[in-house]
Amino acid sequence: MMELILVILFFSVSAAICMRVFAYAKLAAARSEDLSYAVAKVASAAECFKAAGGDLAEVAGILGGETAGEDSLRIGYNEDWLPCGPGEAPAYVMTLLKSDETTAAIEVAKAGGQAGGPGGGESIFSLEAGAAGEARS
């Protein structure tokens, strides 16, 4: 009888460890997917910024989004990484902050939250892009 209890205990511990590994794998896959989409969106925004010569109004016309003054552009994306429609709450936010006429910091973050990034949530990816052709991460 004692051997059966030990076997059940060992099985329970093994099952708990396996469940934890699978849960971590799911979280890692979700983070990886978010990073892949964020890199693609930031690269696209950097290319648009470069092609527009640093004009955020033109970048907003190409990518969508809304300008907040002359030096800031904000674009919201839903859970499927598609641009948000009017009145739709974004799951992710891309922010372009123009530091001078030819350079902008571009960041994608989760919407909301308490982190200090421009998107308000956890930063996923950021890049500094230059309209003159250079891009630095």
Image (cartoon, rainbow, N blue to C red):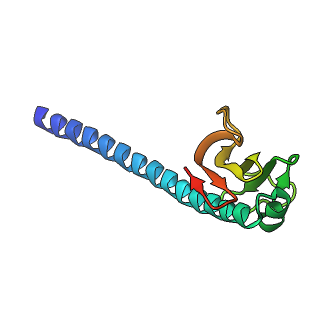
Residue 62 visible (yes or no): yes
Tell me if residue 52 comes above or below residue 56 in the rendering.
Answer: below
Foreground residue among 79 and 121:
121
Residue 129's image quarter? bottom right
In this view, the residue farthest toward the front is: 132
Tell me if residue 92 comes above or below residue 83 in the rendering.
Answer: above
Question: Residue, x 67% and y 38% (percent of image)?
Answer: 117
Question: Residue, x 67% and y 31% (percent of image)?
Answer: 114
Q: On the rendered structure, is 42 left or right of 32? A: right
Q: On the rendered structure, is 29 left or right of 8? A: right
* Residue 30: image location, x then y, percent: 51, 53
* Residue 125: image location, x then y, percent: 58, 49
Question: Residue, x 59% and y 63% (percent of image)?
Answer: 40
Tell me if residue 3 comes above or below residue 127 in the rendering.
Answer: above
Residue 92 visible (yes or no): no
Question: Which quarter of the image is occupied by the N terminus?
Answer: top left
Foreground residue among 2 and 12:
12
* Residue 44: image location, x then y, percent: 65, 64
Tell me if residue 126 comes above or below residue 7 in the rendering.
Answer: below
Q: On the rendered structure, is 73 left or right of 109? A: right
* Residue 96: image location, x then y, percent: 73, 50
Question: Residue, x 57% and y 58% (percent of image)?
Answer: 39
- Total label count? 0
Q: On the rendered structure, is 113 left or right of 137? A: right
